[in-house]
Amino acid sequence: MNRLEEIFKQSKGRMDYFNAYSLYLNHLLMDLDFNAVSSVIDCFLDARKNKKMIFFAGNGGSAATASHFAQDLSEVGRKVNREGFRTISMTDNVPSISAIGNDYGYGEIFTMQMAYLFSEGDILTVMSASGNSPNIVNAVEFAKKLGGKTVGFVGFDGGKLRHLCDHLIHVQSQNREYGPVEDIHLVLDHMITSYLIFYFLNEEEKP
């Protein structure tokens, strides 16, 4: 039984469940390593400075978060009227995903998109609650082979990505708690991109 099942069984009704779910999200959020979040921001700023691409990938709900994150980060420059971040979400090209999946296997849907686009020094940012999705693991290994940097947003016990990514933000949840992990990943998207907007608007970082 994971924490959500416990919350449901202990709740007297819907309001109790909603309140307990919210409190659990707050617990997961406040338990994050915010130094790791800061490290990811520095990684993105370094990519912007060196005009490198930032690729995003994920499956299922994490695919939606990857697309959302890529869009939000790409908007930062426009919102502050400065040079922005170069982003691409590899979850958005359905013809490419379906063709690669059909012809070469689902495990290669990201690596084959990266093959002619990813360059040394580019960044691959992946979202995976389990940290074990084969196509995500393949993409991280491929990015490192090409001389890229890797950023992972994971949950549960971190899975294989815990030891593969250069930068890792780990939502330390119980196993199979996809909803809360994906909730926190989306919060991190907004936390990071909103900070970057204020960072540029105020020209210097607050201590």
Image (spheres, helix red, strand yellow):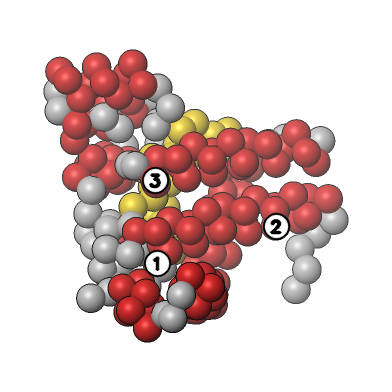
Give the mark nearest the N terminus, 2 or 1.
1
Q: Residue at x 33, y 16 (%)?
A: 95
Location of mark 3 (residue): 61
Give the mark nearest the N terminus, 3 or 2.
3
CB within 8 Å, label 2 to label 1: no
Q: Residue at x 15, y 18 (%)?
A: 103
Q: Is residue 205 left or right of residue 19?
A: right
Q: Is residue 5 left or right of residue 87?
A: left
Mark pair 3, 2: CA separation:
24 Å
Location of mark 1 (residue): 170
Quadrant placement of the N terminus: bottom left
Mark pair 1, 3: CA separation:
17 Å
Give the mark nearest the N terminus, 1 or 3.
3
Q: Specify whether residue 150 is in view.
A: no
> Hey, which quadrant is residue 152 in on the image?
bottom left
Location of mark 2 (residue): 195
Q: Tag on residue 159?
A: none
Estimate the x, y position of residue 54 in percent, counting from the top left.
49, 39
Q: Amino acid at mark 3?
A: Gly
> Hey, which quadrant is residue 122 in on the image?
top left
> Hey, which quadrant is residue 60 in on the image?
top left
Q: Is residue 112 left or right of residue 72?
A: left
| Kind of element beneath mark 2 | helix
Closer-to-camera residue (182/11)? 11
